[in-house]
Image (cartoon, helix red, strand yellow):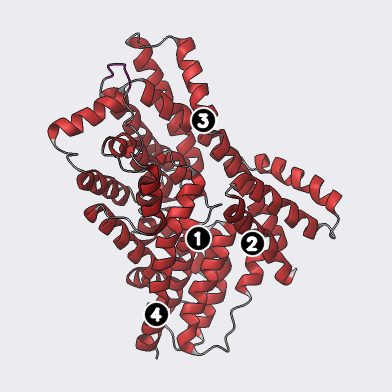
């Protein structure tokens, strides 16, 4: 399908920027992809597009993600209505643990860095933990979304004692490498994008200063988001017990679904199971203390789900678009643009840029790894460049798209967990991501020269 396969992702990006609406942009991109797949027939493109959306549910993992996206809305609303969030905020303020915007931001960043075992868990735990605190200190939800999004995939690909490490190690097998594990570990200090974006996050948290469109966004808000404070006199364990259940539940269910191997567990299943358990626990606590009746809890749960329906629609359409672009071969076409006739010092930066384009267009870092590693590793073995450098270029570019693509599951989940408008999150985070990518390019060139031979 060659260059025409680039039309759907470009349409999605351009229409999103132009109209500031993600759902119509995704629908148009799906339609365009299916028209291309069905001989430029618009009628077939329309029906095939609808079929493509329906087929998302044929994949159990996709269905689990969509169910989770609804249920997390119920959990967030119940936590808020119980008064547990307010009680937790008051406790941290009273003890001085969260005494300033700096300490609140640093606490959130630290939590995201500590929970490196699963990127979605990192986003969820950090977002739920910090929402009330950010409101209390008049920090925007877009700032929160940036912090939690910038400490999930980047830290997961740097501390590889998780599913990311197992997946990457599996992809490295079969290329005649003497020690794939050594190659993977050697890529960590060369993963410039992940290191730089984490540095930006720590600086933002420490200095409490923001730049680019994030600064403009916060200025436009005036007095930012009133505190999430309910009239109910909630108890702190209404917040902490469900949150701990969510975090520990994901870890335990990953161990269970991985048949005793944590890093091989199913992230989508584990998150869904743990969310259901956390909701059931909170229901039990609130009914036992007679704060709500069963009917009231059901109503509040559905109210929370309803608030997240637009986000769930974005997730659904993003999954469908990813399937369409896979059928079109968009990733394969971009990967094929890499040429071994390039000067050796351009190989790593070109691999990085190619990975960034693929991941941003498709919204998947792992898919990008799968497409590009079979290209990058043979290039490294046949050139003067060490394999860890080319591997780092692929990982850096893949994390770039996972971090800032409007159709990336991590980006969508960060918007959801922080309670930030999705488009606002994409718009305010993108300049940081582009700056980190821009700083990474010359570093890949520099290290190509230093590591040649």
| Distance CA(mark 4)–CA(mark 2) | 26 Å
Number of the front mark, 1 or 2: 2
The numbered disc on residue 10 is: 2
- Residue 296 coordinates in the image, percent (x, y): 46, 12
Which is nearer the N-term, disc 4 or disc 2?
2
As helix, strand or loop, the secondary structure at mark 1 comes to: helix
Residue occupying the point 34% across, 66% down: 196
| Relative depth, front residue between 378 and 62 | 62
The numbered disc on residue 401 is: 1
As helix, strand or loop, the secondary structure at mark 2 comes to: helix
| Distance CA(mark 3)–CA(mark 2) | 29 Å
User: Which residues are drawn in magenta?
Assistant: 230-234
The numbered disc on residue 442 is: 4
Residue that carries the numbered disc 3 in the rendered image: 307
Count the marks: how many? Answer: 4
Residue 298 magenta-highlighted? no
């Amino acid at each position: 399908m060659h260059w025409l396969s680039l039309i759907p992702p470009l349409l999605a990006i351009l229409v999103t920027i132009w109209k500031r609406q993600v759902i119509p942009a995704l629908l148009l991109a799906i339609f365009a992809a299916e028209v291309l797949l069905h001989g430029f027939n618009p009628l077939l493109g329309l029906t095939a597009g609808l079929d493509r959306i329906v087929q998302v549910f044929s994949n159990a993992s996709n269905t689990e993600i969509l169910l989770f996206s609804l249920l997390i809305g119920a959990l967030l609303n119940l936590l808020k209505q119980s008064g547990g969030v307010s009680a937790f905020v008051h406790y941290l303020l009273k003890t001085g643990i969260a005494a300033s915007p700096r300490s609140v931001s640093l606490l959130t960043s630290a939590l995201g860095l500590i929970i490196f075992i699963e990127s979605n868990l990192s986003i969820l735990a950090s977002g739920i933990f910090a929402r009330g605190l950010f409101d209390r200190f008049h920090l925007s939800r877009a700032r929160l979304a940036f912090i939690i999004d910038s400490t999930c995939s980047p830290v997961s690909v740097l501390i590889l004692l998780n599913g990311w490490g197992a997946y990457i190690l599996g992809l490295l097998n079969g290329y005649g490498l003497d020690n794939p594990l050594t190659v993977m570990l050697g890529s960590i200090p060369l993963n410039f994008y992940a290191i730089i974006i984490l540095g930006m996050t720590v600086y933002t948290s420490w200095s409490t200063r923001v730049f680019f469109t994030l600064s403009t966004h916060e200025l436009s808000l005036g007095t930012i988001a009133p505190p999430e404070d309910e009239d109910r006199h909630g108890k702190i364990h209404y917040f902490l017990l469900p949150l701990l259940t969510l975090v520990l539940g994901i870890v335990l269910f990953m161990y269970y679904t991985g048949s005793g191997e944590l890093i091989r567990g199913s992230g989508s299943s584990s998150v869904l199971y743990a969310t259901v358990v956390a909701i059931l626990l909170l229901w039990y606590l609130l009914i036992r203390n007679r704060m709500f009746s069963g009917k009231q809890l059901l109503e509040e749960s559905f109210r929370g789900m309803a608030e997240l329906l637009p986000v769930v629609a974005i997730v659904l359409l993003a999954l469908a678009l990813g399937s369409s672009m896979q059928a079109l071969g968009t990733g394969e076409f971009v990967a094929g643009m890499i040429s071994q006739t390039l000067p050796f010092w351009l190989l790593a930066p070109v691999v990085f840029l190619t990975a960034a384009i693929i991941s941003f267009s498709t919204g998947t870092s792992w898919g990008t790894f799968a497409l590009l590693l079979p290209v990058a590793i043979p290039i490294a073995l046949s050139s003067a460049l060490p394999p860890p450098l080319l591997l780092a270029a692929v990982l850096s570019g893949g994390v770039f798209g996972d971090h800032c693509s409007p159709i990336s599951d991590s980006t969508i989940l960060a918007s959801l967990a922080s309670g930030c408008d999705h488009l606002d999150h994409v718009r305010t985070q993108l300049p940081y991501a582009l700056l980190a990518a821009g700083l990474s390019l010359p570093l890949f060139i520099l290290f190509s020269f230093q590591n040649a031979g």
